[in-house]
Structure formats: structure tokens, C-alpha cells
Amino acid sequence: MNQRLNEEQALKNAHLLVRKYLGNDTTGHDSLHIERVVALAKYLAKFEDDVNLFVIELAALLHDIEDVKLNHAGSGVVQRFLDENDIPIDERNQIIDIIDNLSYSSTLKGKIERTKEGQIVQDADRLDALGAIGIARTFAFGGAKGRMIEGSESATLHHFEEKLLKLEGLMNTREGKRLARKRTEYIQNFLKQYDSEKNIRD
Ligand code: ADP
Ligand code: NI
């Protein structure tokens, strides 16, 4: 089959896989998160030269399917998908590598995205953790995991200092950094407003 047609079909199949495993997710990792990461990654790719858009799009589509903290799919689902869709071996390895190194916990373990494609998908995923959408996702995650808003050790409000406010400093691409600055500022304002309402200073 013609390579282009093959790629189009693989992308369509990946959308179906996303809907199957993340369609009912209530932790902020639902299909709409995935679609936003795809759109952000394609946008960031426009600022970079010579990147493989197919690898970027497929990695973005598949990046949360096997996330263990979500427990939606067992391991091996992504590898099987790549095999069944006849993705060429070098692209298959690139995609697996991107997904393995994407998360914040991987970053804390010293793992890095080695390719421009990986750096773009990682920036896209991080951007969706920031701004108004990031705030909504964070509380959705906390609620889904039975956590309090604040007032306990594991409360959701800690997640902002613990991780989200650090993401800006970890961005890979220039345009990613620019957007992260704006979205981080929005979160900082949200936290200030939260605090002022709490202390009846508004
Ligand atoms: P990563 O795997 O890099 O940590 P994910 O994309 O899986 O990132 O998670 C992203 C979003 O899920 C976070 O930005 C946040 O909104 C939510 N999230 C993850 N862990 C927590 C947590 N402990 N408390 C609140 N929200 C969380
Ligand atoms: Ni994600």
C-alpha cells in the first residue's frame, strides 16, 4: 500500500484506540486532552525545521494509553498497535522512545527527550497541564483519585507548587516556553486570587 495512505489509516486507527481506552476517562486524560496535545504538537512543529510530523502525531495520540496511574490499558497495547499498523521499525522505535521519556516522573529520573519530535510532544503535553485547562484537569484528577482540594498532605492544591509551576523551566522549544510563560502566569494569578478569597481580602 502507498505509504501516505498507510499513515492516514494508522492515524485514524489511533484515534479509535484513544476513544476505546481514554474515552471515558475522568482524570483529565480523556480523548479531548489527547486531541489538544495533538493540536499543540502540530502547532509547535511549525516553528521547527525538518521534523517527522507523522511520528509527532502518532506519539501524541498514543502517549497516555498505557500510563500506569490511569490503569486503562495493560502494557503492550501500544507496541501491538504499532506492529498491527505496519509502522516502519525506525518510526516504531522513535515513538516508543518518545512515550517512555515523556512524563514528569521520567524527567525526575533524569530521562530526556532525545529527538526534536519528542521534545515537541513533551512540550505539548506540558502545556495542557498549564493555564485554565491545566487548572481544570488538576482538580478533575484530584477528585477522581478521592483527594481533598486543600487541607491534607495529598490535597490537590499542593500539586501546583510540587509540579505545575516547575514545568515552565523545563520546556524544550522556544514557542513552547513562550506559551508556558503565559499559562503559568494564569495559574499564579489563580493561586493569588484563591488565597485572597480565603483570607477575605478580595
Ligand atoms: P505526567 O505523567 O508528566 O505527570 P500527565 O499528563 O500524566 O503528566 O498528568 C498531567 C495532569 O494530570 C497534571 O498536569 C495534573 O493536571 C494531573 N495530575 C497528575 N498527577 C496529579 C496529582 N498528584 N494531583 C493532581 N493532579 C495531578
Ligand atoms: Ni498527557
Image (cartoon, grey):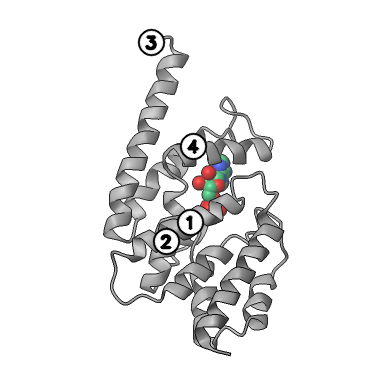
SS state under label 3: loop
Q: Label 1, label 2: how many angstroms apart (C-alpha)?
A: 6 Å
User: Can you see residue 119?
Assistant: yes
Q: Which mark is residue 135?
A: 4
Kind of residue sitting beneath label 2: Ala
**Can you give x and y, in whole percent of width and height, for residue 131 in the image?**
41, 40
Q: Residue at x 56, y 35 (%)?
A: 156
Asked if disc 3 is less than 8 Å from ligand 1, the answer is: no
Q: Which mark is residue 201?
A: 3
Kind of residue sitting beneath label 3: Arg
**In the rendered image, which quarter contains the N terminus?**
bottom right
SS state under label 4: helix
Kind of residue sitting beneath label 4: Ile
Q: Earlier in the sequence, mark 3 or mark 4?
A: 4
For marks 4 and 1, give the one nearer the viewer. Answer: 1
Placement of 18 over or under 24, stated as above or below: below
Q: Label 4, label 1: how many angstroms apart (C-alpha)?
A: 16 Å
**Can you give x and y, in whole percent of width and height, for residue 44 in the image?**
35, 61
Residue denoted by label 1: 37
Asked if disc 1 is less than 8 Å from ligand 2, the answer is: yes
Q: Are the residues flagged by discs 1 and 2 in contact, CB closer than 8 Å? A: yes
Q: Residue at x 48, y 68 (%)?
A: 57
Q: Earlier in the sequence, mark 4 or mark 1?
A: 1
